[in-house]
Amino acid sequence: MENGRVRSASLVPQALAAAAIMMAWQWAGKTTRDSLFLSEFPSSALPAMMGGAALCSLLTATLNAALLRRFGPARIIPVGYAAGTALHLIEWALLPKFPHLIAVIVYLHIVALGSVLLSGFWALANERFDPRQARRHFGQIAAAGTLGTLAGGVMAERVAALASLQSLLLLLGVLQLLCAIALFRFAPAREAAKHAQAPSFPEVISGAPYLMGLAGLVVLAAMSASTLDYLFKASAAAHFEKGAPLTRFFAIFNTTTALIAFAVQMGINRRWLGRFGPGPTVATLPMAVTGASVLTIFAPGLAALTFSRALEILLRGSLYRSGYELFYTPMPEAEKRSIKSVIDIGAERLGDGLAGASVQLLLTLPSQAAVTAILGLTGALAAAGAWIALRLDRVYVKVLERGLAHHADNVMPAATGKLEELDSQALALSMASTTGTFLGPGEVIRTAVDAALPVTDPAIQTLVELRSDSASRIRAALQRPEALSPVVTPQVIRLLDRDDVAQAAFDTLCRCGDGIAGQLVDGLLDPTNSFNIRKRIPKVLSSFRSRLAWDGLSANLLDARFEVRTRCAKALERIAARQTSFALEQSFVFDVVRHELAHTRKLVPGTSTGASGMRTALMERKAKTVAHIFTLLGLVLPRRPVRQAFRALQADGTRVKGVALEYLDSILPKDLRKELTAYLEGLLPPPSNVPSEEAVAQLLDENPSIMHRLEYWVATTKAREETGHSNATQNKEKPKDA
């Protein structure tokens, strides 16, 4: 993840600058839009204007979605800001001659183009940052945007006080030009992939129906914000004179709100998102609006409406925005470009239109009754939005799973971290303790042979052959029906210790069926048995269907030998694929994962062991530990996404790794996800109270195969050195003209 951290660090300043300038334009534009419109039209014209702007935004969103699918946000959004600069200059020139018309055009410009550009900026940010980087930096970007909002409010207030409304249009043109320049720098140098084949909106929705819930939340949030905004603006227009006083009130309100929002973002935004996740973070907005609306019903007036509107703006620009944008980060770029602008703009403007129509209908009531009804509608809409938002974490997990499926299917696992069986001749050991185990029937045989007693029982004859030193005689005996007898089973199990006949013994034990599960479990649990026997028994048990095999393997997930633990986990995985009724307790598996993490943290490469062979062995052990942990998680969590996350972590691209880590953050308990993701990212320091020599000794004790690898490494290194020395000697002895 190191390269990813460097890349994101270089992008963050560019994103912060673009967000600050963009939001300065947005907020100064809203001040100009509202003051200019209310200076030319009565407040009763607002609902109709809201509906018209919503319709215009829907058309703009449709065009924008098509352009994004074809060209991508990196090429479209900066050009959009440059075009907005030219439009503002035209509005500035024509305002004195056509004030009513320009007031309407400015309103449509700020609402329709502003929402498209805002959504496009976040779409670009979603493509430039992976989910882990987004969780770290989106709060900072939102905070920079809030700081820009503060600057935009101050500039709008000062220009309105010292100049005129017309001069505000020049300010907006300059800000859009600066934002276009900043976005050209933030966008990638070139598009890496073609986007003509991006799926359409219906195709994306049909493949991901949970996005409809997200769109529903946006509609409800927009409706509640629009109804509250209408009441606030109507009350302000009734209290202040049109023109400069009204403009200055809106500017001061926007500036103060931005200042408070910035303080909130710097203080709690990132920590809130990290603690509660995207769903509850997004839910803070509708929950707060519900409470504020209810309170305003009992304490109506400009002050209460100002507070309610400020609270909505504060949370929308901070916690809501940071959490909401995370839902799109893991999505494939093609799908994101097809869906994001439609939901961001289309759903929001649909909410604005529905809110405008609802307000227009409720205004037919008497004045005070209309205000109460609109506040009641606002609270009800926000409450429905909160109900959806609190369930969005499940949606986010689905988004992450789809993102993993998209990225990880094209990723080949690294050789050191495969989830395949780790048994091979390279890892087989010649263990010293190969006698004295499973000798019950064998004692009878040895006694019979030593006494030269005649043996007529076929089972005893088979046992005699199985205790032979000849591999061919043993393989022939394993083909007899008597080899499947329970009395012969202990000797067959013992043959797992011999590399030359282990495969034949394995095949015979698998043919015996569930009836020998108890004997195999006893052999697995007996620490006095040889390492080869204990590490090969789990694979035999994995072919069974009995509960006894399942329980025996589960009990050995905390075995002292690491390779025995890994094989037991793989065996459980195979049984679980066939016996869906078998299940482990999540808490137990999570405790096993914690045990693996605590154990492996002591095994840190480097320190006093400077040999590269030891370092390689330690790094390989870490890779195997990661594979083992994901096998364990797959026993109690959805197996396919977990396997895809494992594969994604071995990819070269930082984005797919970020999706995998964010998925783990979303499905694991807080303490475990924090430790596991830190371990995977290499952020956990080794315990200071564990000497490196002790760690290495412990590693070799529980992983005998590492010693085999070290011996192989030493031998090959020595051979290379001798070969190099020999070649150097030969070259030295050659004639100069050779």
Image (cartoon, grey):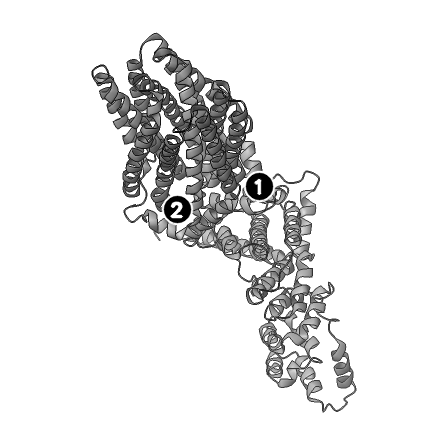
Residue that lies at the very extreme toward the top in this rendered image: 162
Q: How many marks?
A: 2
Name the side, left or right, on which 37 lies relative to 583. left
Q: Which amino acid type corresponds to the residue marked 1 in the rendered image?
A: Ala
Quadrant in the picture for residue 574: bottom right
**Residue to which mark 2 is pinned:** 332
Residue at (35, 18) in percent of width and height: 35
Q: Is residue 120 above or below residue 472?
A: above
Q: Is residue 479 above or below residue 11?
A: below
Relative to the observer, which residue lies in front, 14 or 566? Answer: 14
| Relative image position of residue 296 (x, y in whole percent) | 52, 25
Considering only order in the chain, which callout, 2 or 1, is on the residue closer to the N terminus? Answer: 2
Relative to the observer, which residue lies in front, 387 or 649? Answer: 387
| Relative image position of residue 737 (x, y in whole percent) | 34, 51
Label 1: few (<14), some (14–19) or many (≥20) C-alpha neighbours in 10 Å = some
Q: Which amino acid type corresponds to the residue marked 2 in the rendered image?
A: Pro
Q: Is residue 467 above or below residue 324?
A: below
Residue at (28, 17) in percent of width and height: 170
Relative to the observer, which residue lies in front, 126 or 217? Answer: 217
Look at the numbered disc 2 and give the secondary structure of its residue.
loop
Relative to the observer, which residue lies in front, 649 or 103? Answer: 103
- Which of the two marks, 1 or 2, is nearer to us in this view? 2
Residue 85 tag number = none
Name the side, left or right, on which 578 lies relative to 697. left
Residue 721 appears in the figure:
yes
Name the side, left or right, on which 302 lies relative to 344. right
Label 2: few (<14), some (14–19) or many (≥20) C-alpha neighbours in 10 Å = some
